[in-house]
Image (spheres, rainbow, N blue to C red):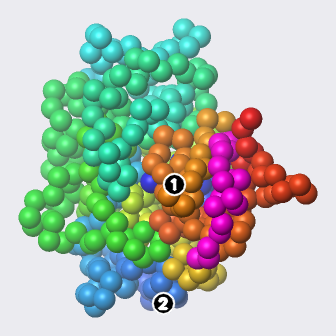
Amino acid sequence: MLLRTFRRHLSTGLACVVAALAACLAPANAADLQKQIDALAKPLIADGTAVGFVVGVLQDGKTRFFNYGETAKGSRRAPNPDTVYEVGSVTKVFTCTLLADMVERGLVKLDDPVQQYLPANVKMPMTDGKPIRLADLATQTSGLPRMPANFAPADPGNPYADYGERQLFAFLSGHTLRRPPGTYEYSNLGMGLLGVVLARRAGCTYEQLLSNRITRPLGLADTRITLDDRLRHRLAPPYNAALEPEKNWDFQALAGAGGVRSTARDLLRFAQANLAGDGPLGKAFRLAQTKRCDISNGLAMGLGWHIARDGITRLHSGMTGGYHTWLAIVPGRGIGVVVLSNTATMRISQFGELVTRAAFGSNVEPLPPQKRAAERKAVAVDAATLARYAGVYQLVPAFDLTVSVQNGQLMVQGTGQQKLPVFAESPTKFFYKAVDAQITFVPDKNGKVDLLILHQNGLNVEGKRKK
């Protein structure tokens, strides 16, 4: 979806402020923890932030689940630990666990160039004579963009479904890096490519590799990419931030970046296996959790895992068109937290962080109320005003918002993403229905518009019109 770049990038920054709590607090007891989680969760259902969600907490070897809301609007059927959700970018943790396992088995090395595992007719981009390595893909430091430039989904509601290896290899062969590997830049493309490379090395599909090396050995029977009838019956339907129905997402080449579907029970088992650090994947778990590089603001990267400022907590969040997932583990403290929701709102990550802090023993307060898209009133804006906003606005290097008018509707498209409509609540303020975000256009004293502001996650990001 549009703004995926910002939602996922900002979720990483937000999530990693778990801070130094893990080092100094005692875990909450069961009764107090349930009271805190109830107090945090119930307002999100009451104010319509989410249709429903499941929370799983691991403490002292014991697992507990808390269920809120509905699986489908109006169904009055509560979700449960076996309800199936798309986990989005939490898939990246699975992909990097596969990498760590193949390293431990001697099948690949972290320093191997990616080019080594691609067909001879595919040319991996390189700059300054420095090849992109497998470790660079796994630590989000490859230099590859967040999304490939030839990403043009036929169905914006299911954007990854028609992006296969042919398009991926064509993009790589024609792409020029802006900088050599080594600088953190979140890339769905890079992690999807890692999944392709590992599957090619193993001589099977990514989904087969996932099953052979992780889900089957760990007994994660409900963690799949392709659902059978048994799991499809338990799949919670997807909703966007305005609580409108969305489509499920299907993946081809970039499955390793976000194609997994799972349950709270399975994800908490995965978290527990990571914390135990033994069994068939023990060495791989420890390797994946090992700090590989610093990124910014006291944060760091393992293989796939983001490392919080406390230096202990490992975490990742994920979002697709109608789902949001949070996963956090605290090695050495025996704490694991998962949250799975069938509503694509960043407030699930904020909530997940609060639950994680509560599991540490910290007293936390519920999230403040937030005005939702469904509560915003759309107003009519004349065609001449809309035309003034059309243009390309740069928010950060290599990420622009392209604003256009189609059949009287203002449309916004992020770099490498699909177009989404925005709706006016005033002549200068517009809101998305598909995501928790708004845009303000800022005219100068002469009425010319060369600046917009993206409001998302409590941040205000300016974008200047490109000449």
Instruction: Tell me the element at label 1.
Output: strand
In the picture, the quarter occupied by the C terminus is top right
Say the numbered circle drawn on residue 224: none
* Quarter of the image where one finds residue 15: bottom right
* Quarter of the image where one finds residue 18: bottom right
Say the numbered circle drawn on residue 406: 1
Using the image, determine if residue 246 lies above or below residue 156.
below
- Residue 296, visible in the rendered structure: no
Q: Is residue 254 magenta?
A: no
Query: Which percent across, then down, holds residue 97?
Result: 33, 41
Q: Is residue 383 magenta?
A: yes
- Residue 450, visible in the rendered structure: yes
Task: Write the residue at 59% across / 81% down.
Answer: 377
In the picture, the quarter occupied by the N terminus is bottom left
**Disc nearest the viewer among 1 and 2:** 1
Q: Earlier in the sequence, mark 1 or mark 2?
A: 2
Asked if the residue at tag 2 contacts the one at tag 1, i.e. Cβ–Cβ closer than 8 Å, the answer is no
On the rendered structure, is 211 left or right of 146?
Answer: left
Q: Residue furthest left?
A: 229
Q: What residue type is labelled 2?
A: Ala
Which residue position is annotated with label 2? Answer: 46
Magenta span: 378-396
Using the image, determine if residue 264 lies above or below residue 211.
below
Q: Which of 5 and 78 is in front in this view?
A: 5
Q: Which residue lies furthest to the right in this view?
A: 445
Task: Write the residue at 53% across / 61% down.
Answer: 409
Task: Write the residue at 65% across / 42% down.
Answer: 392
